Structures are given as structure tokens and as C-alpha cells.
Image: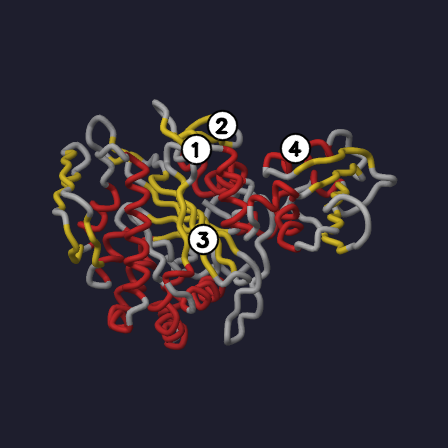
């Protein structure tokens, strides 16, 4: 019989050293907290899950878990903030949508964190559902389907997720004694049906948890949801700086309790600490935020595909969009499966690459291979991530910048180990 997975809180109770490790790393690192009810960093409860969803590729290996912990490769974490749905009888119903989505990329190569906010009304294709707003993915399939939707939409691997409930943000802020925010204007809004009463005055001030939640949720101005996203990012930075303050050490027990009781994630305990150690070494200038480019329509946030490709290439791959546009790629079918090379070429073209040739390979190959003549390793890694599991071979000589030889492995399941861990 397999040993039942223990909760974060059970492990804290078992060992004073586990608790001490969290005190050492959590205070300076849990600084990426984030609007509506969330902290961008909720390195806490790796609880139990039911159901399963597969993501686009296996999680990258996070190297050695012996001290000092080190992040070896880029890791992308989807932050999911869930709202509360109230029916016509003012009762909370067990069907929620994601009120806030942010994909954070931890890049040890560039020593930075990039975070992209995805407006909740963004028009996307939800796998197995069809076209809808991105926030509906959570209602249809929980964290698993939300991860798949974002990964497919952005064409970026999403390795992990952190889900926060509606009250997480307020409790985290209260645990550290509030955050200082320069409120840009008076904000007043009442929604008696939802029990929301916002009344904030303009000016720099210390906001408690409920006030900070109100500031992050306010959307009743011409900027609408996009203004709300910008305020979430503003609160995130304020929380980041507050949590890196030495004075916050005294709040560590309350922080750990608030995080453990209000979050869900598929990150393991050691992975959380590894990401935390990485974050603790960064300054505010090492954290970059952006909002998904697009425009408002009557019902949707309509993504700007060209600008989105540029943002994705720069934030999640560290590759300038102009380099992507100038990179020539030929795609050869070595799988024996008709049409597979064309499918791969279409994916790469959608990312902005120049496809100069699609043809059959001289022979069938077992593993999808990228031959890199460009001398730009980041570009080859981007292609490998877009396609999935691939090996990269460096070559010199005449030919296009990259040759992709597609194998049958592109048709197989990508991440059995991660799929077993990614639970609702």
C-alpha cells in the first residue's frame, strides 16, 4: 500500500527543523503576493487532489534539494484566484470561475521573474469545451483544465499551479500588518447582493487586508478589468517589498498559517522552497509585469495575436521578437505519420517563425530533433518548448537556422509523471 501523502501542516507539526526551514526562507520570499485574493507566492500547502489533467510537457528538473537549494531551469507557475458565485437566493454555489489569472516565469538564466496577467474575459478556446472566456475553464474543469487552456492559448508550458480562494489575499495582508499603497483616486462602489462595500480615499496609505482586497477588485471606471489588473500588479510589488523587510520576520507564524489554510498547489514541499530561495535573491527591478495585449469588445477581451507572440517570446523564453521573426526553419517529417510536419510548422509559424520548407525526412526517426545552426540557444529552446519533448543538436554549415525533424513521439502523451501529480 502506498504511503498516504501528508499535508503541509502535518509536516510542520512533525519537525521543528521543517518549521525552521520555512522561517528561514518564507519571509523574504513569499513576496510575490497578488491581487484579488492571492499572493503570487503562496509557497505552502501541497495538499491532496482528486481527478487528473495532463499538461503540455513534463516539469523541468529542479536540481539537488540539498542545501543550498538551486533552481536549475526555467519554471512557469500559473496563479489562479477563484471567485465566489452567488445564486438568485444569495446562496454561495459550488461552481466558481477564475477571477484572476497570472502566469509567472522563474528564469535562473536571466535571474528574473516575469509575470503575465491574463484578463478574465479573454477570448480563448477551452479544450473539450470550445470558445469562451478564459475564466470559464475553471468552472468546467478546475485547475487542470485551466492549466491546459492557458498552455494551449499562449503556447507556453505551464509546469505548476497555485490556487487561492477569495479570502486568501486579505488574510495574507493582515498577517503582515498591511501594505502601503498610493491609491490613485477615490474609489467607491457598493454591491449589496455580493456583500461588497468599497470606500477608499485617494492618497498614499496603509491598507489592511480587506481594504487591499477592495483596491485590487475595484473595476468600476473606464479602465474596467484592465485597470483592476494593473492594481493587482501594484499590490503585488508592495507585498513583495513588505515581505522582504526584516521586520516581517515577526509575522512568519501568522503568514505560514494563512498560506497553509488558504491555498492549493501541485508543487512539492522541496520545489516550493527551491523557488522561494531563488526569489529571495531578487530585487524589485528583477520582477517584470505585463498584461496580455488586446482590446475590449462587447463581451470579450480580444487578444492581439502579433503583440501576444512578442510578449510570450520575451517574457517566457528570453528571446527578442525580432529574432524570432528573422529565424528560418525547415520542418521535415520523420514520423511516418502524414501531416505531422505541417502541424508542427503551423505551431511554429503561429509563434512568428519563418517556415521556409515543409517536407519528408530521408528516413523515419525515433526522437524529434532540432538541428541548430543559428548559434542562438534560446531560439532552439523556444522551438523545443513549443513542440514538446525534443533533443537539440548544434551544427555548423549551410542551411536554414533550424531544421526540425519530427518524430512519432510528438503524437504520444507528454507528461505521465506530472499528470499523476496535477490534480483538481
Give the alpha-carbon distance from disc 1 to disc 3, as whole Å: 28 Å
Q: In which quarter of the view is residue 355 placed?
A: top right
Q: Earlier in the sequence, mark 3 or mark 4?
A: 3
Q: CA distance from mark 3 to mark 4?
A: 27 Å
Residue with the mark numbered 3: 114
Residue 415 visible in this rendered orientation of the protein: no
- Residue at 45%, 36% (x, y): give it: 141
**In the image, residue 402 above or below residue 94:** below
Residue placed under numbered mark 1 in the picture: 140
Q: Residue at x 53, y 39 (%)?
A: 309
* Relative height, residue 170 to residue 329 (above, below): below
Toward the viewer: 421 or 302? 302
- Depth check: 126 or 34 in front? 34
The mark closer to the camera, 4 or 1, is 4
Q: Which residue is label 4 attached to?
A: 346
Q: x%, y% of residue 323? A: 61, 46
Name the mark on residue 129: 2
Amino acid at each position: 500500500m502506498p504511503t498516504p501523502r501528508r499535508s503541509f501542516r502535518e509536516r510542520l507539526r512533525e519537525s521543528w527543523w521543517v518549521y525552521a526551514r520555512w522561517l528561514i526562507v518564507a519571509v523574504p520570499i513569499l513576496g510575490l503576493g497578488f491581487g484579488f485574493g492571492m499572493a503570487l507566492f503562496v509557497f505552502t500547502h501541497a495538499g491532496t487532489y482528486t481527478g487528473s489533467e495532463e499538461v503540455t510537457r513534463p516539469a523541468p528538473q529542479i536540481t539537488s534539494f540539498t542545501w543550498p537549494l538551486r533552481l536549475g531551469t526555467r519554471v512557469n507557475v500559473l496563479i489562479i484566484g477563484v471567485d465566489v458565485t452567488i445564486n438568485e437566493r444569495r446562496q454561495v454555489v459550488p461552481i466558481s470561475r477564475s477571477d484572476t489569472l497570472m502566469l509567472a516565469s522563474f528564469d535562473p538564466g536571466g535571474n528574473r521573474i516575469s509575470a503575465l496577467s491574463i484578463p478574465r474575459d479573454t477570448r480563448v478556446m477551452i479544450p473539450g469545451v470550445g470558445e469562451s472566456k478564459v475564466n470559464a475553464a475553471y468552472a468546467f474543469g478546475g485547475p487542470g483544465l485551466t492549466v491546459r487552456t492557458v498552455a494551449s492559448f499562449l503556447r507556453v508550458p505551464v509546469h505548476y499551479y497555485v490556487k487561492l480562494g477569495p479570502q486568501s489575499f486579505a488574510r495574507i495582508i493582515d498577517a503582515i500588518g498591511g501594505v502601503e499603497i498610493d491609491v490613485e483616486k477615490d474609489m467607491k462602489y457598493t454591491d449589496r447582493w455580493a456583500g461588497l462595500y468599497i470606500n477608499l480615499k485617494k492618497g498614499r496609505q496603509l491598507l489592511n487586508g480587506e481594504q487591499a482586497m477592495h483596491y485590487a477588485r475595484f473595476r468600476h471606471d473606464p479602465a474596467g478589468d484592465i485597470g483592476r489588473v494593473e492594481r493587482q500588479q501594484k499590490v503585488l510589488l508592495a507585498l513583495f517589498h513588505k515581505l522582504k523587510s526584516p521586520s516581517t520576520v515577526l509575522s512568519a507564524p501568522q503568514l505560514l498559517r494563512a498560506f497553509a489554510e488558504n491555498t492549493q498547489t501541485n508543487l512539492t514541499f522541496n520545489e516550493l522552497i527551491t523557488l522561494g530561495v531563488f526569489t529571495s535573491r531578487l530585487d524589485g527591478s528583477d520582477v517584470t509585469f505585463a498584461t496580455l495585449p488586446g482590446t475590449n469588445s462587447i463581451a470579450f477581451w480580444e487578444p492581439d495575436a502579433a503583440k501576444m507572440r512578442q510578449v510570450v517570446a520575451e517574457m517566457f523564453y528570453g528571446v527578442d521578437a525580432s529574432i524570432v521573426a528573422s529565424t528560418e526553419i525547415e520542418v521535415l517529417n520523420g514520423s511516418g505519420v502524414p501531416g505531422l510536419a505541417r502541424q508542427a510548422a503551423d505551431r511554429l509559424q503561429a509563434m512568428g517563425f519563418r517556415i521556409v520548407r515543409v517536407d519528408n525526412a530521408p528516413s523515419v526517426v525515433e526522437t524529434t530533433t532540432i538541428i541548430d545552426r543559428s548559434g542562438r540557444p534560446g531560439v532552439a529552446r523556444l522551438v523545443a518548448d513549443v513542440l514538446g519533448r525534443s533533443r537539440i543538436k548544434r551544427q555548423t554549415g549551410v542551411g536554414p537556422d533550424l531544421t526540425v525533424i519530427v518524430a512519432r513521439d510528438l503524437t504520444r502523451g507528454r507528461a505521465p509523471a506530472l499528470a499523476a501529480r496535477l490534480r483538481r
